[in-house]
Image (tube, coloured by chain):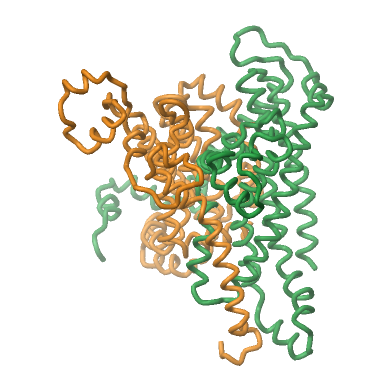
Amino acid sequence: MSSFSVTEPSQKTKWFAGILVVVYALITIVPLLWIIATGFKSPSDAIAYPPKLVFEPTLEGYVNLFTTRTRVTQETLQELGEPTTWYDRIVRQYDMVIAGPSRYGERFLNSVIIGFGSTFLCILLGTAAAYAFSRFRVPLKDDLLFFILSTRMMPPIAVAIPIFLMFRQLGLNDTHAGMILLYTAVNLSLSVWLLKGFIDEIPVEYEEAALIDGYTRFQAFYKVVLPQAATGIASTAIFCLIFAWNEYAFAVLLTSGTAQTAPPFIPTIIGVGGLDWPAVAAGATIFLVPVVVFTILLRKHLLRGITFGAVRK
Amino acid sequence: MARTPIDAIAQATPDSIARRVRGLSDRAIAWIFVAPSVFLLLAVNIFPLIWTINLSFTNFKANRSRDVDYIGLRNYERILTDSDIWLNMQVTAHFLFWTILFQVLIGFALAYLINKKFRGNNLWTTIIVLPMMLSPAVVGNFWKFLYQPQIGLFNYVIAFFTGRDPSSFEMLGSVSLAPWSIVIVDTWMWTPFVMLICLAGLRSIPDYIYEAAEIDRASKLRQFFTITIPMVLPFLMLAVLFRGIENFKMFDLVVQLTGGGPGSTTELTSINLKREAFEKWRTGFASAYAVVLFVTVFGLASIYVKALNKVKER
């Protein structure tokens, strides 16, 4: 676009718009930065008034997050001798010793397993369905597509009642398999719609050429369409992963022990004498940072995905 | 041609089977590809929905294994005459109205500004988008910390600019402020979504329309109201639809932030539904409640989509 274009905003307008947007962005990022900072504060700094901007960073929150501790008497402490590791030293300040690991590690691992498991399944099923909807004449195509979309309108709690009963019957309550299936089903509608959009953009001629060269339909799909759709598949996968990662309602109702993910667990982190805010903040930070990094690295695809999905529907 | 795993499989397959696989009609492949998805959705979405409808006519309680009686429409009667549930509906309506209003105003303004294409707008857009990528439950939990009356950052900042005592008001504890506390957090979190959709709308307006308007000597203000607004409106309405459906279902953020309290001033319908179903274990009643909510969302959404299509046709 030439600089004489009437639609190109003037330098003054650009500066003005830029400053307003930057101010909004800075305000909007403050809560997130504050939580990250709180994770590195000592409990007394975290609840100081006025709020402390400058503080001495400590890993106490993180130690408290990953361990369970017990208070011991001075004599026992003396018998134990000098603390051998840096985390021991932090805990000893409060006359405590580390009793063992906390459950946060397990919960985090559950989030990883369920998140990646459901994303994989969702992409597998979604790509196949999207390809079929995009390329073949499927009977009742529009009805099926609308049906797939409408499953997203149901409030999770409304579906949770029968799913809870169904899972109880099948023994799927509080299992990884159950949660993976559930999240796959919830994400499938979005993934089919997004992927159909991406596959629609790939010219049919590529496959036709492949078919003439003697490929079967499966081979054409596998060798021609999939590589072309790779970017689309990747950004859809990120969406599914972020959703499964963040989900709370089903997780809190259907899991309690073995398969519990991190979101229902983080609010239950309680320290000695009330809520241990640095530990909660540390838990939140570890949980949120992967999403933040993903978003920044893959911003182009993500931003396209959000609007693309919306505009297509 | 390079040897790939699929060739290896193809060559290893006995001829008769290979012929059959290769000979699969497109129609058969279409079904093989679509069936698993449809089956999964039927099993995890539609079957439960039908089950819910069935349960809604009973007095079933999931924590007790006694005989289940069909009691006809009595559950529905109770819901529609229950004054508490109407109160929850009002709370939800308040939440919906204000969150959507704020998100549309701020979201559109931001999109409009970002569309001025100043340098570095991509980076700042990404930063603005961050809140909507986070887990709502965890967000609710950490805003609870920011809202603490004595130690919270939010109270401190408000106190700093208004000169009030930061412990003189409780965002989460007071009946008049709590409904606004959830509106603030939801707006913070979801304004970027509306912004992105508006941005897509703004970017879809071709330049030549503005050029033509410029030649006709239409003022910038006039261009804004006769070109920009009408062209973005369908996108904006779509954003409102999505936010409306999502916020009608709102559960995780608010349950972590206020738990529905104080009293039931922030008890949205989803939270109330969860109480009935999983705390009081009135499964039959809760199922009827779920059906009422689903019909409400579906009905409102259908009417809205009709209106949206009319706007698009213009």
Work out which quarter of the rendered image holds the N terminus of chain A and state it: bottom right
Q: Give the residue drawn at x 69%, y 20%.
A: B284
In the displayed structure, A22 sits above or below A14; it is: above
Query: x and y percent of residue B121 in the render?
Result: 52, 71
In the drawing, does residue B250 fall left or right of residue A239?
right
- Residue B30's spot in the image, x, y percent? 51, 50
Closer to the camera in the image, B189 or A98: A98
x 27%, y 24%: residue: A99
Quarter the C terminus of chain A occupies: bottom right
Q: Is residue A275 above or below residue B125?
A: above
Q: Residue at x 75, y 91 (%)?
A: B215
Q: Position of residue A41 (x, y in %)?
A: 39, 43
Q: Please tell me the colour of chain A.
A: orange
Color used for chain B? green
- Say above or below: A64 vs B304: above
Front-most of residues B114 and A294:
B114
What residue sits 61% from the left and 26% below the top? Answer: A161
The image quadrant that residue B79 belongs to is top right
- Image coordinates for residue A118, horizontal then vertical, percent: 44, 41
Vertical position of residue A177 compared to residue A26: above or below: above
